[in-house]
Image (tube, grey):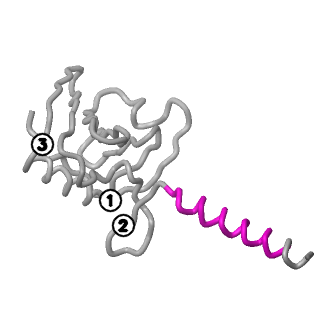
Amino acid sequence: MRRLSVFIMYFFLLVSIFTFTGCDTVVSDPGSGKHSKPIAVVIQDDVTIINITHIVGGQSTKFTVEGDDLEDLRVWVADLQYKHQTYTKGNSPGDKDGGEVYSFEMPEGDYPEFSYIINGKNNCYLLIESEWYSVSNPSNPPVAE
């Protein structure tokens, strides 16, 4: 009887480990074999429309992307390379004056909004669910207002 209870205990321990491991919020980076990209930055195939807010020079413009333009945006996002960063309060890239911001909202499904922050040609960041990521291959999003 003792052996059976030990077996059951180990079984439930393993099940709970695999269950919590499956709740990871990253997707595989194609070709690398690593888990590195948060799921929020991958524009899934079931997304057919994205609402964008572009802020530059204190001016805000809102527009929508869909169709072929959405596919271009999907490729652009998938090609971004980035690394998680932490900052002390008041020192994040969002605390700097100036810059440019593109905020992407996917109203379909349960996908969180993410932003692309441009603080200079080679000084770009992603902000995903309050987490900062520095972009190592910055480029402007392929969108037109």
Q: Report the residue that reaches farthest toward the right.
A: 2
Q: CA distance from mark 1 to mark 3?
A: 24 Å
Q: Position of residue 99 (x, y in %)?
A: 28, 32
Residue 19, horizontal then vertical, whole percent = 59, 61
Q: Reading the chain from its start, which is encountered first: label 3 or label 2? A: 2
Circle 1: residue type? Gln
> Mark 3 belongs to which amino acid?
Glu
Tell whether 104 sits left or right of 5: left
Mark 1 vs 3, N-terminal side: 3
Disc 2 residue type? Answer: Asp
Q: Is residue 11 inside the magenta stretch?
A: yes
Q: Nearer the viewer, residue 132 or 6?
A: 6
Which of the labelled discs sits on residue 29, or is there none?
Answer: 2
Q: Residue 43 appears at what percent x and percent y?
A: 27, 51
Crowd rating for badge 3 (residues with CA inside 10 Å; few <14, some 14–19, many 20+): some
Residue matched to label 3: 66
Query: What residue sits right under mark 1 in the picture?
Result: 81
In the picture, residue 61 is in which quadrant?
top left
Give the magenta part as a residue range: 6-24
Q: Is residue 12 above or below residue 100?
A: below
Q: Residues within 10 Å of mark 2 (few under 14, many from 20)?
A: some
Q: CA distance from mark 1 to mark 2?
A: 10 Å
Instruction: Name which residue lies at 23% across and 54% down.
Output: 45
Nearer to the camera, 116 or 137: 116
